[in-house]
Amino acid sequence: MVMDGVTFIPGRRLQQRGAETIILPLSWGGMFSAGEVPLSGATIPAIPAYDTAVTVYPLCTTQTGTGTSTDIWWTIVILPSIYLAAIDLTLMMDGIYLLTGDAVLVAATLDLEAFPYDSVNGDFSNTDINATAAQALATAFATESFTLTGTNLTAGQPILLRFTSVINITSAGAAGTGRNGFNFPRLSFSGKE
């Protein structure tokens, strides 16, 4: 992926004086299918189809005509060996919404839930460690940030991430379209020097 003339490789990390940033791979939803249960008592929804109409954004939610569309994407990140235990993390993703035709925005949001792996029970905890409310998107790319509470987290621990994208529009002619687009997911934290 290229951003501001710099090539980033998913899964690689960027380092700057004790702070670490990991670029998350865009293999969304590849690990789970509809009906599988990686969380205690939760069911994975069907994976949304890739929206080829907006090739710029690896993740996209589309609504045509008055109504609401919701897409959910899942991925897993494993905290690297340089992660300092119990330190809060920041998950960031660039987001935008676009309107075409006579579409009028009601709401465009991105939400995150984060479930750490529980090695005692052998599954992902059903306790969400994200402390940030859903983020409202704008008409220009902006970084949406979520704080993950680091209490009880350790290096090497997997975290299941669940992103929820919602676009709600009205369209008098029923042909207006609203899209949420997302790119460049990354996780930032304090690391060992």
Image (spheres, rainbow, N blue to C red):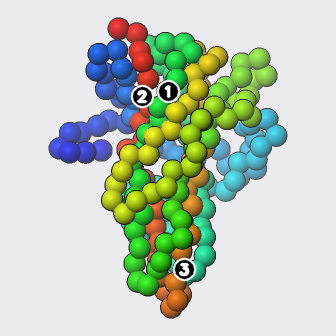
Disc ID at residue 170: 3
Callouts 1 and 2 close, C-beta under 8 Å: yes
Res 117 seen here: yes
Q: Which residue is mark 2?
A: 188
Q: Earlier in the sequence, mark 1 or mark 3?
A: 1
Between the residue at mark 1 and the residue at mark 3, the CA separation in whole angstroms equals 37 Å
- Label 1 crowd bin: few (<14), some (14–19), many (20+), radius 10 Å: many
Q: Which residue is mark 1?
A: 89
Between the residue at mark 1 and the residue at mark 2, the CA separation in whole angstroms equals 6 Å
Looking at the picture, tell me which residue is in the foreground, 169 or 165. Answer: 169
Res 52 seen here: no
The residue located at (54%, 12%) in the rendering is 85
Q: Earlier in the sequence, mark 1 or mark 2?
A: 1
Amino acid bearing label 2: Ser
Give the foreground label among 2 and 3: 3
Where is residue 44 drawn, in percent x and y?
Answer: 71, 48
Q: Earlier in the sequence, mark 2 or mark 3?
A: 3
The residue located at (79%, 22%) in the rendering is 121
